[in-house]
């Protein structure tokens, strides 16, 4: 998380520009054509486990990757405390440099 916008009376924090932040925060499914690296991983897993699931994934034309929700942005007492501490430190730094 980082400060996205500062104005006279508000601060906007978020994760803009961080790849995959939204899918981790909300959860969901990614549908994609498997990359060569993914195929190598699937084949290695198949050789190690002999589980046909990995073989099917290695041969698949399209794979669906389910990402569980790992909420890190939203209303949270812990997050609010962290934001408050960071704001307090930043305001103290500003005040000390301007005195």
Image (cartoon, rainbow, N blue to C red):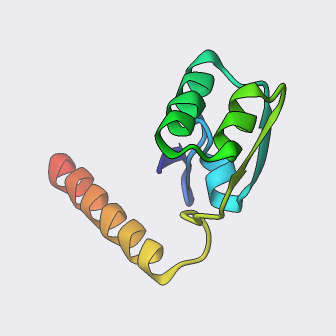
Q: Quadrant of residue 36?
A: top right
Q: Position of residue 51 (x, y in %)?
A: 62, 47
Q: Residue at x 80, y 29 (%)?
A: 60
21 to 38, vertically: above or below: below
In front: 86, or 33?
Answer: 33
Q: Residue furthest front?
A: 50
Asked whether, in this view, residue 11 is left or right of residue 65, the answer is left
Q: Position of residue 65 (x, y in %)?
A: 72, 45
Q: Residue furthest bottom?
A: 77
Q: Residue at x 50, y 31 (%)?
A: 44
Residue 18 visible to the viewer = no
In front: 70, or 44?
Answer: 44
Q: Position of residue 48 (x, y in %)?
A: 46, 40
Q: Residue at x 17, y 47 (%)?
A: 97
Q: Residue at x 21, y 53 (%)?
A: 93
In front: 15, or 99?
Answer: 15
In front: 29, or 56?
Answer: 56
Residue 24 visible to the viewer = yes
Marker count (numbered): 0
Q: Position of residue 56 (x, y in %)?
A: 75, 36
Asked whether, in this view, residue 74 is left or right of residue 76, the answer is right
Asked whether, in this view, residue 84 is left or right of residue 17, the answer is left
Q: Quadrant of residue 28?
A: bottom right
Q: Quadrant of residue 38?
A: top right
Q: Residue furthest top?
A: 36
């Amino acid at each position: 998380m980082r400060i996205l916008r500062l104005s006279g009376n508000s601060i906007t924090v978020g994760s803009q520009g961080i790849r995959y932040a939204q899918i981790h925060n909300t959860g969901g499914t990614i549908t994609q054509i498997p990359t060569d690296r993914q195929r190598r991983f699937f084949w290695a897993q198949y050789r190690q486990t002999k589980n046909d699931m990995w073989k099917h994934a290695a041969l698949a034309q399209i794979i669906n990757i389910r990402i569980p929700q790992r909420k890190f942005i939203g209303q949270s007492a812990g997050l609010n405390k962290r934001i408050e501490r960071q704001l307090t430190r930043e305001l103290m730094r500003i005040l000390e440099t301007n005195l």
